[in-house]
Structure formats: structure tokens, C-alpha cells
Amino acid sequence: MGAGSEKWSGICPAGVFAVIAPVFSPVSPQAEALSHIFVITLLVCAAIFGIVTALVALCILRFRSKPNDPDPIQITGSERLEFSWTAGSILILVWLFVLTVHAMNVSDPAPDRPADLTVVGHQWWWEVRYPNGAVAANEIHIPTGSNLLISAEAADVIHDLWVPQLGRKMDMIPGHPNLVWLRADAPGEYMGTCAEYCGDEHAWMRILVVAQSPADFEAWEARQLQAAPPPGSALALEGLKVFREKTCVNCHTIKGTDADTSVAPNLTHFASRETIGTGVLTNNAASVGLWLEDPQKIKPGCHMPNFNLRTNELTALTAYLETMK
């Protein structure tokens, strides 16, 4: 999903992502190397399949037995033929091995510096930490044209960070951070996912990478360091009260308030994100209301309970969250 791609609307069906083939449209040297070796291997395998299928069909049609035919002459083998296909197979494997080593060197160069940012996999959401202290959730903003070294970590079980258009897969193992390169050479939005089964809502553990020009990225990063604006209306102020009374402060952080816990996504700039629930809903007032009404109905198995909010509480809390730009 690159620049100019259609935005999510309403509840996003998982099939939307299944019909996209981002592996074939890389926008970084790392992803291009992987796509290149994949396409070559696919073509080689297709050619072998075609040759074998044609030979089998030829044998069936040309040498099929007819009534009263004598038993066919038994051929024990041909050394020349056996040597030819053995040598040919070895040469193909050696060629693919050389291409694979080259792709590995391009897609996964040795780390030469500390990580540029940290991505932590949770059940079932993503935490993104920047060196300057900025913290985001479910969206990775990066500047275009830069090789970023990502520290891939896990808070609970094994996850796997994979953004097909930008780089390789990388396992995220609790207690054992791994490093992976991430780069985008064109501005745009690139969809990623968790590629390791991690529990009930594994299928709805999407991540969005937003590649911006260096100037736009710096502006976004500066905004992320700012505290949340104070409630600008009586309704939003009531929403802040509901946020505190319903123990949301025990899980979420909102910079500038007494909410300072990282068990769940940081909500300081919640309203500026494109989706809710790591891709399951488009982020707008109607979707926020649906989510708050019963998170378990929208994303069964998620760790946010149903607080059974009254209508006035739901309206106020929605209004407050919508101020988090």
C-alpha cells in the first residue's frame, strides 16, 4: 500500500490485505533484493514444472500402449542423460545460492550503529519508541531515503515484524532483541503485519509505516513530544473525568496528565492515527464510539475490558479522545 492508496473505511475486512501483493512492488534496496530472488526462484521452478509436465504428457500420448502390443523394452538407464540432469540441477542450485547470498547481504547488512528506533510487539498492538523520547502506537513514521536500524522486541510472546515493501521479516523474541533494517525510498503508506502466530487476534495485528520527507518527519516527531492539549469543552472535560474514573489511567499514557502507564497504547496523539485496534477500525468519532461501547465485540480477545459505559459517559469519553491530535 503506497502513496495515494485508498484509506480504510469502517471495519476493515481482512480480505482487503490478502488481495494486495506488496512483495512485488518494493520501495527499498532491501525489499528489492528479496523480491528479485523470489521472482527468479519462482520463474526457475515454473520452468522446471513446465518441462516435467510437458515430458510426462509426451510420454502419456506418444508411448501409450495399444491392444495386443508386446511388453515394452525395459531400459535400465542412460549415463549421459543422468549426468546431464544431475549437472544441470547442481548448476541451477549453485546459481540460486550465489543470488541468495547476494540478496542476504543487501537485505540484512551487518549493524554498524545503535538502533535508530525500537518497535515492541504486544498482544495485539505495536509500540514504537524513538530515541528522542517520542512514543507512538501502531504506526511507524520514518524519513524517506534513510536506512533505519530497528530494534525488534517483544513484551509477551514471539511476534514477527514484516513490512513487505520495505524489508525482510524479523522475529521479535521476549528478552532477545533482534535488529532489522527498514527503509523507504518513496513517500507513502506501507502496510505491515505480524508474521508469527501470537494468539487470538494475530490476524488483526497490522502496522502502518508512514514514510515522509525528512522535513515532514521532523515536524511530526516534534509534535509527538508535545503534551496532549487540555480539554477544550465541557464535554471533553467530562470525558477526562470518565477516563480517570474508569481506571483507563492504569493502562494508558496521556502526556500532560497523570496517566503514565505503558501497558496499553500511548494515547497522547491518539486522534492523529489512522486506525483503531491495529487496523480493525478507521479512526473517526463513530468508530471510537463503537470501540468504547464494547472492545470485545470489535476485537474479541483483546486485553481491553468492556466498561459498560452509559451513553453520556461514552459520548464524553469519545469527545475527549477526539481532542488528542
Image: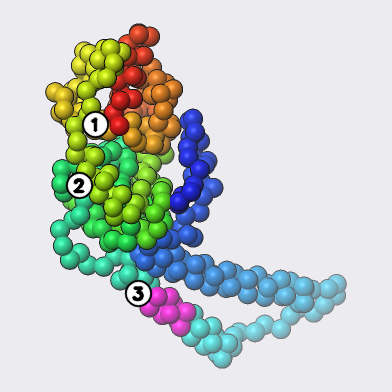
Hey, what amino acid is under mark 2?
Tyr
Rate crowding at label 2 as few (under 14), some (14 to 19) or many (20 or more) other CA atoms within 10 Å. some
Tally the marks.
Answer: 3
Q: Looking at the figure, which quarter contains the C terminus?
A: top left
Q: Position of residue 72 (x, y in %)?
A: 74, 80
Q: Report the Cα–Cα distance between label 3 and label 2.
A: 31 Å
The magenta segment: 90-99
Q: Report the Cα–Cα distance between label 1 and label 3.
A: 43 Å
Is residue 100 on the magenta stretch?
no
Label 1: state its secondary structure: loop
Position of 204 with respect to 120 (left or right) is: right
Q: Are marks 3 and 2 in contact (CB under 8 Å)?
A: no
Q: Nearer the viewer, mark 3 or mark 2?
A: 2
Judging depth in this view, the residue of 60 and 187 nearest the camera is 187
Dot label at residue 268: 1
Q: Which residue is mark 2?
A: 130
**If you read the primary sequence from the N terminus, does the residue marked by circle 1 or circle 2 appear first?**
2
Dot label at residue 102: 3
Label 3: state its secondary structure: helix
Judging depth in this view, the residue of 198 and 296 nearest the camera is 296
Q: Which residue sits at x=39%, y=36%?
A: 274
Helix, strand or loop for the magenta stretch, by majority: helix
Q: Position of residue 147 (x, y in %)?
A: 27, 61
Displayed quadrant of residue 261: top left
Q: Is residue 34 visible?
A: no
**If you read the primary sequence from the N terminus, does the residue marked by circle 1 or circle 3 appear first?**
3
Q: Report the Cα–Cα distance between label 1 and label 2.
A: 15 Å
